[in-house]
Amino acid sequence: MVSFEVRIHLRAVEVLLLGMAVYASIPSAAQSAPGADAANALEQIAAEILEAQTQGGPYAKELIEPLRDLSFVYQGKGEHALELAALEQARQVVRANYGLSSLEQAPLIQQQIRAEESRGNFPVAWDLEQALLTLAQKHPDDARAAPIYHEIGDKRMDLMRSYLAGERPPQLILGCFYHRSQQQPVPYDSNCASGERGAALLHMTLDAQRNYANAIAVLRRQQEHSGGELYELEDKVLRNSYLLRDYQTGRRSLVRLIYDDAANAEPTLGRIERLVQLADWDLLYDQRPLAFNLYERTHAYLTHGGVAQASIDELFAPATPILLPTFQPNLLAPERAEGATGYVEVVFDVSRYGRTSRIRVLDSNVSNAAQSRLTRWIVANRFRPRLADGEVVDTSRIVARAYVQE
């Protein structure tokens, strides 16, 4: 068998003429491979590359897969410069075959971004990400654009969490988030390295929200009304709407999900729970007539439909009060008992508007400080009002136990 090094040497001149320097780098990579598996993988890939070149020329589309395989080999070896060289050559082949603005190159750009980030080259990674967004914007009717927007939205939320944890990731400066969200111009005299903390958090959240919304729009243009990704995106839009205090965007997301549940013939109780969540949302934003009407109509539907009283009570009179919105962590949830170091048993009133009052600790085995934290949390939050005889109750007396860790 002709060795890997010899085969590459025989084509080295041709490879260099074609600007494919990555191939010329393969021999040294094989010699330094930690084991036979890596060398064998490189040898097989080299054979595929040479065959594709021979059959179809320097930009044969059959080169795309082996070039990406080559990038994965280098990625596994931590040789990101060689990984990037292989990816760049693969992109050139893709563009030659599918066009300069083809989405076929998106997975390659995404891998380039990760490779640049892995070696700490964040400015280049940021520029590549902006190019990827521009590419997605050119294909509003292509379902492949949705995961691009989704991933970048997630990255903005990860950035925000890092910032809240006291870090200052380079993307904070590269995106100039102290002064703008991505579609707002940066003021002429802005210093992107500093600014108000609240403004940075707002702009990161807005940018994430815009990307999630773009992903949803792409999927819905494809008549996509089901599937995990769409539901996941709508959930993220709803959560961000709560952070942004954006009533209308959050409500539209819930309404879309209600129609999706109906179109997908989801189980009745699941669809009903979504309706109740819509009423919760209205109540949180003081749209009281809408909220009370929806609560009561839903309760009547369940009652007249012969649904078991226990199931109705889980929604409208549960043993554990339901925190609003329901996706927030509930300190009164019984599952928090696992791993807890103590408890606080409290009694308090919940009004028809979900607000709390007359809070009192009944029993506890934790410090006064832990008790105070819990009571402050109860004051700061709202809970779903209870229904009796089909109507929202003016005031409900609640007794609950919170499990805490000190």
Image: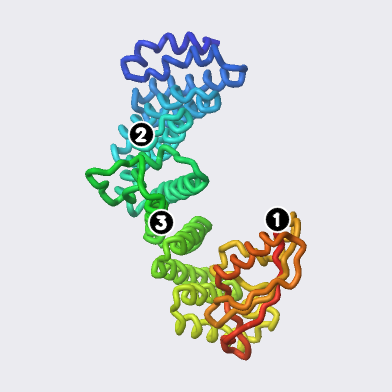
Q: In the image, which disc is placed on residue 306? A: none
> What amino acid type is highlighted by mark number 3?
Gln
Indicate the position of residue 349 as horizontal and vertical percent values: 62, 79
For marks 3 and 1, give the CA distance.
Answer: 33 Å
Task: Please give left or right for residue 198 compared with residue 293 in the image.
Answer: left
Q: What quarter of the picture does the N terminus occupy?
A: top right
Q: Is residue 104 above or below residue 302?
A: above
Indicate the position of residue 89 as horizontal and vertical percent values: 37, 26
Is residue 104 something one can see in this rendering?
no
> What amino acid type is highlighted by mark number 2?
Val
Q: Disc 3 on helix, strand or loop?
A: helix
Q: In the image, which disc is placed on residue 94? A: 2
Q: Nearer the viewer, mark 3 or mark 2?
A: 3
Q: Which residue corresponds to mark 3? A: 209
**Looking at the image, which residue is at 35% across and 40% down?**
193
What kind of colouring is applied to the model shown? rainbow
Indicate the position of residue 47 as horizontal and vertical percent values: 48, 20
Task: Please give left or right for residue 92 compared with residue 77 in the image.
Answer: left
Q: Nearer the viewer, mark 3 or mark 1?
A: 1
Q: Disc 2 on helix, strand or loop?
A: helix
> What amino acid type is highlighted by mark number 1?
Gln
Task: Please give left or right for residue 252 compared with residue 333 in the image.
Answer: left
Q: Disc 1 on helix, strand or loop?
A: loop
Report which quarter residue 106 is drawn in.
top left
Of labels 3 and 2, earlier in sequence is 2
Q: Which residue corresponds to mark 1? A: 405
